[in-house]
């Protein structure tokens, strides 16, 4: 029998190809070099000061629009994209959010629903990280129920004129292109909005106590006039943004387990060396029970992510299955981070250790890309055939 590996107790690594491992190692190394040395400082300041440089570096390692094909994208498998999300979120959820929004939301929307001209115009620069994208669906008064959005676009001759406000938009203030969803006479449509368009502004939202190393913004669209070809021709109805969200949620299934892994490893290290009552706290049964339970949920979550990744690569992954994964893995990841916090005692609340940062980050992850409750309702509907949304 192979020896027991505390870092991989179920032998999940055996499911990976050499190429998968190489992708994982590249992203992990990048995060170790570029994020870990500075993340506590960025977090404390509530800034991501190097975001443009980070985006270009992420582009250079192929992490932006990673599973998309053509237009400078890496064409990686969905499992590889998932592994990248896990490694990025093991560093910080804010960095993973930058990559998710860029690749799975903004780029995917253009790649899946855009015209050939729109793809040529935006995607190569987005894949290289030269152009940052954002995705504006949520509004101040409409979050879980985006169909009720107030932002609208009207025709004036062949032009479109967009008016409305979007809220909580990741990457908004640094974006060169905003994918904005709006009501039209023709139902909900998506627009690729150059952020230097007159009438467009994106003030940053401050005073967040979660995802502090991530740019979050309001989008203000005040009679923004766009040419006819700004509309994404393939996106008609709410199903289009929901498809994009499915892509991003899939990455979160993996990413959340990265945050959990860091907190788990921190707790194990701490428990081995911290002594109370004359012995390491890891030698107490109560601590071991916590660590054992954390390990169960961590590795079950990673196994679930792999399973969904393989279904995604096979083209058989259903939205309900993504809800299953997002609901479970984010919920369990928060629990793991909070338990890790207890094992670290007072040190657990310090930024000297990563656990409180991850735990507070995951509060956002629990809410965005469909709240935990929305995913319970998706599963509830699938299980009963009864729609409890309204
Ligand atoms: P609400 O929809 O008002 O929900 C409040 C509570 O009511 C939740 O617990 C919810 O589950 C519950 N609830 C609502 N309806 C029901 C119901 N029918 N039954 C039971 N419970 C219900 N959005 C974007 O478009 N783009 C982004 O890039 C983006 N980035 C984000 C970054 C951060 C840091 C954060 C925090 C949010 C981001 N969001 C983004 C917004 C996010 O998607 C929304 O916050 C989310 O969809 C929830 O909407 P809401 O906050 O308006 O909450």
Image: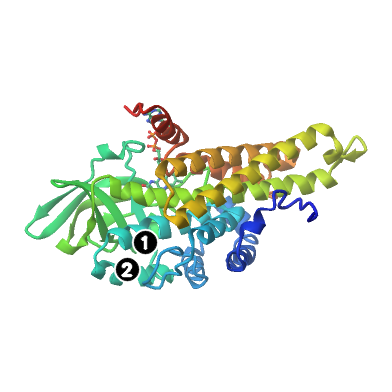
Query: Viewed as shown, does residue 61 lie left or right of 132?
Result: right
Query: Viewed as shown, does residue 365 lie left or right of 4?
Result: left
Comparing 79 with 253, the one in front is 79
Provide residue 10's location: percent of width, then percent of height. Answer: 69, 49
Query: Viewed as shown, does residue 215 lie left or right of 243?
Result: right
Image quadrant assignment for residue 281: top right
Taking the image in four quarters, ligand 1 sits in the one at top left
Image quadrant assignment for residue 225: bottom left
Q: Are marks 2 and 1 in contact (CB under 8 Å)?
A: yes
Comparing 282 with 54, the one in front is 282
Q: Is residue 41 above or below residue 344?
A: below
Badge 1: residue crowd in 10 Å (few <14, some 14–19, many ≥20): many
Describe the element under mark 2 as helix, strand or loop.
helix
Q: How many marks?
A: 2
Q: Spot the residue most to the front.
A: 1
Say if residue 169 shows up in the picture.
Answer: no
- The residue identified by callout 1 is 107
Provide residue 163's location: percent of width, then percent of height. Answer: 20, 49
Badge 2: residue crowd in 10 Å (few <14, some 14–19, many ≥20): many
Q: Earlier in the sequence, mark 2 or mark 1?
A: 1
- The residue identified by callout 2 is 122
Q: Spot the residue most to the left.
A: 157
Provide residue 271's location: percent of width, then percent of height. Answer: 80, 43
Mark 2 vs mark 1, CA separation in Å: 8 Å
Provide residue 161's location: percent of width, then percent of height. Answer: 16, 54
Is the distance from the Cβ of mark 1 to the nearest ligand 1 atom less than 8 Å?
A: no
């Amino acid at each position: 029998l192979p020896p027991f590996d505390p870092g991989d107790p179920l032998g999940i690594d055996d499911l990976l190809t050499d190429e998968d491992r190489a992708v994982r190692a590249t992203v992990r190394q990048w995060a170790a070099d570029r994020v870990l040395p500075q993340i506590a400082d960025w977090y404390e300041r509530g800034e991501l000061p190097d975001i443009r440089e980070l985006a270009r570096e992420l582009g250079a390692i192929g992490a932006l629009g990673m599973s998309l094909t053509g237009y400078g994208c890496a064409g990686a498998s969905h499992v590889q994209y998932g592994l990248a999300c896990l490694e990025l979120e093991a560093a910080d959820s804010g960095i993973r959010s930058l990559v998710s929004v860029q690749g799975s939301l903004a780029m995917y929307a253009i790649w899946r629903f855009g015209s050939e001209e729109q793809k040529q115009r935006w995607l190569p620069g987005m894949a290289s990280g030269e152009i940052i994208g954002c995705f504006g669906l949520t509004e101040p008064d409409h979050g879980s129920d985006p169909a009720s959005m107030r932002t609208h676009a009207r025709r004036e001759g062949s032009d479109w004129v967009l008016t409305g406000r979007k809220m909580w938009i990741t990457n908004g203030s640094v974006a060169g292109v905003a994918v904005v969803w709006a009501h039209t006479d023709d139902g909900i449509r998506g627009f690729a909005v150059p952020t230097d368009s007159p009438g467009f502004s994106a003030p940053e939202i401050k005073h967040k106590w979660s995802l502090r190393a991530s740019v979050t913004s309001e989008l203000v669209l005040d009679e923004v006039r766009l040419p006819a070809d700004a509309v994404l021709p393939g996106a008609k109805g709410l199903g289009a943004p929901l498809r994009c969200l499915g892509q991003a949620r899939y990455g979160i299934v993996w990413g959340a387990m990265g945050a959990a892994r860091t907190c788990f490893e921190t707790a194990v290290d701490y428990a081995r060396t911290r002594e109370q009552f004359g012995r390491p706290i890891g030698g107490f049964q109560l601590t071991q029970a916590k660590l054992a339970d954390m390990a169960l949920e961590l590795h079950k979550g990673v196994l679930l992510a792999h399973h969904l990744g393989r279904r995604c690569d096979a083209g058989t992954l259903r939205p309900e299955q993504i809800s299953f994964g997002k609901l479970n893995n984010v919920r369990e990841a928060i629990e793991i981070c909070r338990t890790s916090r207890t094992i670290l005692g007072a040190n657990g609340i310090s930024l000297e250790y990563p656990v409180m940062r991850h735990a507070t980050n995951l509060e956002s992850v629990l809410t965005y890309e469909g709240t935990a409750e929305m995913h319970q309702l998706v599963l509830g509907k699938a299980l009963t055939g009864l729609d409890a949304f309204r």
